[in-house]
Image (tube, rainbow, N blue to C red):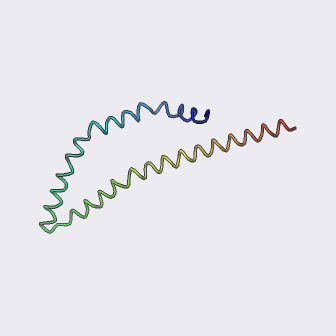
Amino acid sequence: MQYVVNQLNYLKPYLPLLVGAVLFLFINIDAVFAQCPMCKAAAEANLKEGGSHANGLNVGILYLFITPYLIVAGIAGVWWWHNKKVAEEEVDELVQQVIEETI
């Protein structure tokens, strides 16, 4: 339980930043949704005229789709590496305590 409390204390300085980021996303949600019909209309018009800009739009959508997952995977990797390092240090301390107690 103490380990979980330590991890939560580690995140406390970042809490205002996280809350601010979430609020920023929710405040701008109308502007984001307003762009979807405009992009769709522009892509359909371009395809009707024989253009290939819609293909580039699809690649851009895939890029935007994958980017958040890569960011989350990177954060999860750093978190896992940090926790693994902390856990190894705790095990080393416990082993040293046991060795000292047995001597």
Image coords of residue 58 (percent x, y):
27, 61
The structure residue drawn at horizontal position 19% and vertical position 46%, both measured from the top left corner, is 34
Q: How many numbered dots are placed on residues in this image?
A: 0
The quadrant holding residue 3 is: top right
The structure residue drawn at horizontal position 29% and vertical position 57%, both measured from the top left corner, is 60
Q: Classify residue 20 as left or right of residue 45.
A: right
The structure residue drawn at horizontal position 24% and vertical position 45%, both measured from the top left corner, is 32
Q: Classify residue 15 as left or right of residue 49.
A: right
The structure residue drawn at horizontal position 27% and vertical position 36%, both measured from the top left corner, is 27
Q: Is residue 6 above or below residue 65?
A: above
- Looking at this rendering, what residue extends furthest in the front direction? 1
Report the quarter where the N terminus lies: top right
- Looking at this rendering, what residue extends furthest in the bottom direction? 50
Report the quarter where the C terminus lies: top right
- Looking at this rendering, what residue extends furthest in the right direction? 103
Image coords of residue 24 (percent x, y):
31, 36
Image coords of residue 5 (percent x, y):
57, 32
